[in-house]
Image: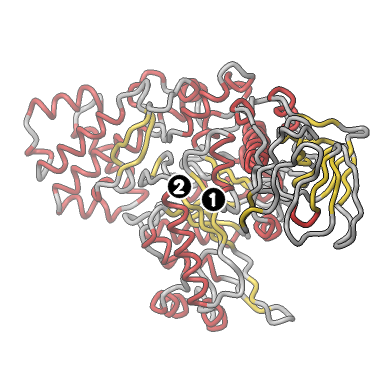
Amino acid sequence: MNSQFKCGATSRDGPKIFAPLPGGPAVANGATQVVACHGAVYLLEEVTLSIGLRVIGEWFASSGAAHFTPDVLTQSIAAFRSPAYIVRNGTTGVVGVGMGGEFRMLSGASGDTAQTFNFPCLAVLPALYPEWLGDRAFLEAHGLRFPYVAGAMARGITSEALVIEMAGAGMLGFFGAGGLSPARVEQALATLQETLAATRPWGCNLIHSPQDPQLESRVVSLLLNYDVRRLEASAFMALTPAVVRYAFRGVTRDATGQIQRPNHVFAKISRPEVAQHFMSPPPQAILDALVQAGDLTEEEVALAQRLPVAEDITVESDSGGHTDNRPLGSLFPTLSQLRDDLVARYDYARPIRLGAAGGLGTPQSVAAAFALGAAYVLTGSVNQSCREAGVSDDAKALLAQAELADMTMAPSADMFELGVKVQVLKRGTMFASRASTLYNLYTRFPSLDAIPADDLARIEKQLFRQSVGEVWDDTREFFAVHGPHEIDRAERDPKHKMALVFRSYLGRSSRWPIDGDSDRRLDYQIWCGPAMGAFNAWVKGSFLENPKNRTVVQVALNLLEGAACVTRAAQLRSYGVPIPAAAFAFRPRLLQ
């Protein structure tokens, strides 16, 4: 070894070895065993290098190669499915990566045996696969190959075709039942059950319906009748009997005494106070009511008291649709700590798994989610621009043009009176501003009749394209079928009548992009988060830039492949390998 190379005499326990002097070996008190490297002799038990790592063995290039320069280091990162050896160049002192070759551990715990080796090896990184990025227990619990979930997007945007494609690739998809009639939901369940049956995992969404609790109950009845084993609960602010009924129907003990639950709730959560409900056993009052209604047995209730409502919690950060816009880096650790506290408090036999969602549109963001401890990742916005998504090509073209800041918040149709907002696409549409105008009028005036004539005329011309009287006639006809109680209440309460009229615009605005009604493009309500803009920036110039080439499986495979590559780059950098910035920029490619 060149005598000018400073070995860096520091480790966690203080100085251990000094730079070799010309003509002699390094020296340390009390050590006896030595190893030789390119003519310089080191003490085996005390070998450390400038980055504080001990030499663990020797790596022979033989049929492999050692990489030290940025261009070839990037190639070694791409080969993450093979073991990587962290090696030191004995002449320059540079840390690099050995690929292939042969590794041997340093031998002996005492004695004076010296070994000469091609490269001192500081660490060995095993092969890395995208399948291994998440929690193996999650994969086993749901029969999956990849820790990747396509979340539900309402009104069937996460379509039957999308769910089927995900299942075929060893991933999980949830049909977007929110905003659909029970008859349409049943049609989808029949298709999925016939196509996938019990051989491949899939699920269906249940969105919180505070305005119509019976709708939740009807959807849950359909899920139970069709043996749907996975439910994604979204936009919930508290537990409802429908969710608890689904979660604990069929819970029993097996022959070994272990509690088994056939139904699995995935709760999308963005607030700790809501997460606590789903991470805890259900309230006794709800259980008692379900027993009285004949929806749960006494045995199921007894076992329910030993289980959380959901064993899979999706930590939902800044996402499309219903969101609190929380950053994942703050939200995930908060809910992780809450999870740990509740698991310890209730002494659960099985852990609660946390997934990550919101803002996941690039390999770096997916890798970051797994680094936070996510058992799985869940995507939404990026899937909406894929071929299998249940939206029109016109809407997909708008989504494919979105940039990072092209999203905004707008009033929600399903929780309009509560002031709840959803995140939507801003670019190419005026929906957000127009919906906000309606909510502003709702908060200022007690009834439609109290709205100033100029304001009323403007919304009739620009938004409704008909008189509010005609809108009410259409709304009344709708609720005569889907909720007669709403009509009765509107007749008694003029403000509620105004809310129903305004909600009709919000409701129809989410149908127009699905149907591709280009005459209504300025009124498109497209649920979308910043992940869409990040994704578009990432795929620019690649085959995925064109939405016609975007399939949900290709998007998923590229995000996972890239996340594994980014993860490997981070691993190598943590061992002192000088990883170039370009190594963290995975480019999309056609994957099988």
Say which residue appears at 67% left-offset and 78% top-offset.
258
Residues 238 and 178: in front is 238
Residues 303 and 442: in front is 303
Residue farthest along the top direction in this orientation = 541
Describe the element under mark 1 as helix, strand or loop: loop
Image location (x, y in percent) of residue 490: 20, 50
Answer whether labels 2 and 1 touch (C-beta < 8 Å).
yes
Image location (x, y in percent) of residue 105: 86, 52
Q: Is residue 275 left or right of residue 383?
A: left
Q: Is residue 81 left or right of residue 105?
A: left
Q: Is residue 11 left or right of residue 271?
A: right
The quadrant in which residue 256 appears is bottom right
Q: Is residue 305 above or below residue 178?
A: below
Q: Give the label on residue 554, or none.
A: none
Cα separation, mark 2 vs mark 1, equals 8 Å
Q: Which residue is mark 2?
A: 329
Q: Is residue 441 above or below residue 312?
A: above
Q: Which residue is mark 1?
A: 372
- Is residue 165 visible in the rendered image? The answer is no
Q: Which quadrant of the figure contains the N terminus? A: top right
